[in-house]
Amino acid sequence: MNNTDVSDLLAELRTRGPLVQCITNSVVTGFTANALLALGAAPAMVDNLEEATVFAGIADAVLINVGTINPAAGETMVATARAAGAAGTPWVLDPVAVGGLPLRDRVSAQLVPLRPTVIRGNASEVISLAGLDGGGRGVDSTAGPETALEPARSLCGRTGGAVAVSGPVDHIITADEVRTVSNGTDMMTKVTGVGCALGAITAAFTACASPADAAFAATAVWTIAAEVAMARASGPGTFAVEILDALHDLSPEQLERLRA
Amino acid sequence: MNNTDVSDLLAELRTRGPLVQCITNSVVTGFTANALLALGAAPAMVDNLEEATVFAGIADAVLINVGTINPAAGETMVATARAAGAAGTPWVLDPVAVGGLPLRDRVSAQLVPLRPTVIRGNASEVISLAGLDGGGRGVDSTAGPETALEPARSLCGRTGGAVAVSGPVDHIITADEVRTVSNGTDMMTKVTGVGCALGAITAAFTACASPADAAFAATAVWTIAAEVAMARASGPGTFAVEILDALHDLSPEQLERLRA
Amino acid sequence: MNNTDVSDLLAELRTRGPLVQCITNSVVTGFTANALLALGAAPAMVDNLEEATVFAGIADAVLINVGTINPAAGETMVATARAAGAAGTPWVLDPVAVGGLPLRDRVSAQLVPLRPTVIRGNASEVISLAGLDGGGRGVDSTAGPETALEPARSLCGRTGGAVAVSGPVDHIITADEVRTVSNGTDMMTKVTGVGCALGAITAAFTACASPADAAFAATAVWTIAAEVAMARASGPGTFAVEILDALHDLSPEQLERLRA
């Protein structure tokens, strides 16, 4: 994909306004919903067991983020992923902090076989997630994206989807190829929920494109919005505000910043 | 009510600083609390069963918003509405996304007979809420406010209170009359929690005025603050920040924008 | 401590980047995480029973804030405080709205004997917390910080730590001494989570300093950041954004504003 393809896909997304169901962590719900609205999607945070499984058949895409999981939420996540699969609704798994925390590890190990359309995480999370069944976790919080390539490929083999590894250079991996996006700013690590919002934005794009194209376009759009915001921000507080304005108005001209 | 009446009521609210208990959804808690503080009210998000029923007798008003309901929260909502009624504390029901989602539909059907002082929602939610007992739901997410007038009146007949229907033109309905407010901006639909915050602001005003006056003043104050904010904002991120500043400083002169 | 000591401690904190586990209320999770990131710490909102007790042995410090407690959260709080104590991890208790609300009163009465490193609250909360076992609560929501000195000292006698009482003048109390900080702005009371964020910032400093030094430095840094933000803000919305920018860039020169 080049910047014209991303631009076309963003235009299509804004026209369709996909309904994105989010089962996400309690820290980032508001920021995630605002990022989806700024993108042109419609967020719906339906996350109780009874309704979430119904809604997975209505929504255009689903996000499951295990950041502040608890036992009831874990049960809802598995049931909703199953319902999404049954309904043919694409869904994204964000395995926040997986690797060494028992509840999210157990639930994530149940979620991978349900075949998420896209898995999005940092290198450590992707390595940990790939190793959950094998016992050899080898978590390293300083792991670079390239160390996650082989684990990501093995996950793609199990899900049939794509894996997006966030980092200074973002990698989008499928069984057959690796694409990179080299946009963004360090300030993205100084605001909570920037990675989690990318998971939601990725879900929105899965309603309009293949897994790899969705992950690529979401990463491009969000990291370029971050660059636009950074030029206007004077710190993490203003950055978190400006990135929403930037995403809302992102233009084809701005997408020419894409460094793929 | 004209802009002078609204201005007087806002001044009274700021002097009294009503304590508003919020049982609301997890996406908007922070924005709702900040909107109440900017208004001049005191938010209290006490939402566990044991304490919520105690607090409903201490608070000046209560908000119940079913946006991210779960079974335990539903039980707390019903018990708190009952406690508010017993204590004579006015309360507002915001039936977010009611109509086709089973848990919130069941709980909302229990809440209406407990006679909320004001019901606040969009047209689809009000139509759905009115139809919950009758089976004839007829939900239409594109329903205009005018299609909600008759359902709203039937709800007023059951609650003895008012119903506020949000939309491009906001309608405040009682058994006897319909009032309208034509302020606001489309950007209100691009930020999560703008409608939910109006529910909380309405609750604050119920501590100082009749149901219909409270709903009217809350709608006027919030939609005019939105217009003031829009003039300073460059997108949804800055709008969500500026609306709090605008509400905090809203003046009698600015309330002259009221188009009732 | 003078402003140079605070500046040195802030530099050390930024170098070490302590991992701060937060079990906090649902209204302020995002703002709290952003405040910790702006400070230079790493937030982790791990709050389910199973993982929270594991994480208390990994984290550099723990915050327990009872603001939106429920029965399951209360159980997690007590178990996590116990795990933190066993692991030698310092922890901060923020007894939000304690005094007359039964669940948080019971849980807080269990938490004090587990010896929090620092207790942070307003005068009413500290007075109430000190009286929970004695029955003589004497809660007064208008209590000034000086009325909390004796109750705070009695808490210090039980915990061996420090108590920080927020107010127009902040007081940091140990068994042996009282220090004051006279910085800040009234606008801090118009934004939700400003006090709760101070609890988290205090926890971050407990990873680098004695209880009293941690509470003093946290209070100094946060209230001076508030003054810097106030000069740039035009209301509570912009203030909440600017305080994060100000904290992120807080300099030794700005810390010379300290009025201890």
Image (spheres, coloured by chain):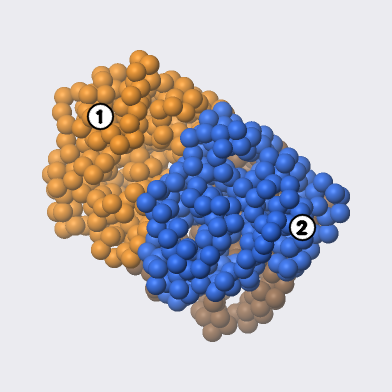
Chain colours: A orange, B brown, C blue
* Residue A73 x, y percent position in the rendering: 53, 31
Name the one closer to the observer, C113 or C197.
C113
Mark 2 vs mark 1: in front: 2
- Residue B90, image quadrant: bottom right
Please determine whether, in this image, residue C103 is positioned above or below residue C144.
above
Q: Kindly check if marks 2 and 1 are in contact, taking CB atoms under 8 A apart as contact.
A: no
* Residue B46 x, y percent position in the rendering: 68, 50
Which residue is rendered at x = 47% and y = 28% of the image? A101
* Residue C148 x, y percent position in the rendering: 74, 62
Helix, strand or loop for disc 2: helix
Q: Quadrant of the N terminus of chain B?
A: bottom right
Please determine whether, in this image, residue B143 is positioned above or below residue C234.
above
Residue count near mark 1 (Cα–Cα under 10 Å), binned few <14, some 14–19, many ≥20: many
Name the one closer to the observer, B108 or B260.
B108
Outermost residue toward the front in this view:
C176
Chain for numbered disc 2: C
Helix, strand or loop for disc 1: helix
Which residue is rendered at x = 60% and y = 63% of the image? B36
Q: Is residue C136 visible?
A: yes
Q: Amino acid at mark 2?
A: Pro
- Same subunit, labels 2 and 1: the answer reads no
- Which residue is denoted by mark 1 in the rendering? A148
